[in-house]
Image (tube, rainbow, N blue to C red):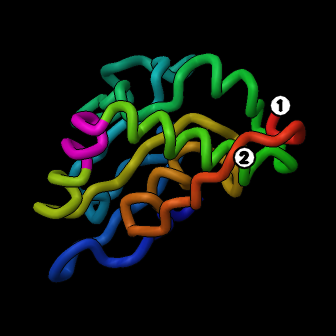
């Protein structure tokens, strides 16, 4: 997978998005793993991870509820944003990193269109999902 980029976060700064299993590239900048669990089958020595920020990952309960089900994507993003609002220090630490330099968020999920790293990248770019009351569809 090629690295995706989100909106610029400062002068010349962008956020990259890449599967942790993909080879590193010089343009990645600071490589930050944003998964709560270490990726399966990947030795730490081979990961080329500069920083592991477990606390910005969704909770285990939210991750299991979502299960990468595209029909739950919007609800997942709202719930994930709410979790980050309950943990402002972790999100602020990541925001500070992306303001200072090029950062590539690394994730292990196979689904490239519906994963927490993509949602996190959108939130860092200012596209926070609107909070709304929980409905029966939200689970």
Residue 16 lies in what quarter of the image? bottom left
Dot 1 lies on which element?
Answer: loop
In x, y percent, where is residue 90? 27, 35
Residue 68 image label? none
In x, y percent, where is residue 39? 52, 23
The residue to which callout 1 is attached is 139
Q: Is residue 59 magenta?
A: no
69 up-or-down from 128: above or below: above
In x, y percent, where is residue 2? 54, 64
127 up-or-down from 75: above or below: below
Spatial distance from mark 2 to mark 1, Cα to Cα?
A: 9 Å
User: Quick one: which residue is furthest to the left in this view?
Assistant: 100
Say which label, 2 or 1, has the lower sequence index: 2
Q: Within 10 angstroms of label 2, few (less than 14), some, or many (20 or more) residues?
A: many
5 on left or right of 89: right
23 up-or-down from 99: above or below: above
Magenta highlight range: 88-94
Residue at 55 percent across and 40 percent down: it is: 80
The residue to which callout 2 is attached is 75
In x, y percent, where is residue 27? 28, 65
Q: Are marks 2 and 1 in contact (CB under 8 Å)?
A: yes
Predominant secondary structure, magenta span: helix
Residue at 31 percent across and 31 percent down: it is: 53
């Amino acid at each position: 997978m090629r690295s995706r980029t989100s909106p610029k976060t400062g002068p010349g700064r962008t956020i990259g998005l890449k599967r942790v299993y993909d080879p590193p590239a010089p343009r990645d900048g600071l490589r930050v793993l944003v998964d709560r669990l270490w990726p399966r089958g990947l030795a730490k020595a081979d990961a080329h991870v500069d920083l592991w920020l477990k606390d910005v990952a969704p909770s285990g309960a939210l991750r299991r509820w979502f299960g990468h089900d595209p029909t739950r994507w919007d609800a997942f993003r709202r719930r994930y944003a709410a979790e980050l609002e309950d943990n402002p220090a972790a999100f602020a630490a990541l925001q500070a990193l992306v303001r200072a330099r090029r950062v590539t968020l690394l994730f292990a999920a196979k689904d490239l269109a519906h994963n927490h790293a993509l949602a996190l990248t959108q939130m860092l770019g200012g596209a926070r999902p609107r909070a709304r009351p929980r409905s029966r569809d939200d689970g």
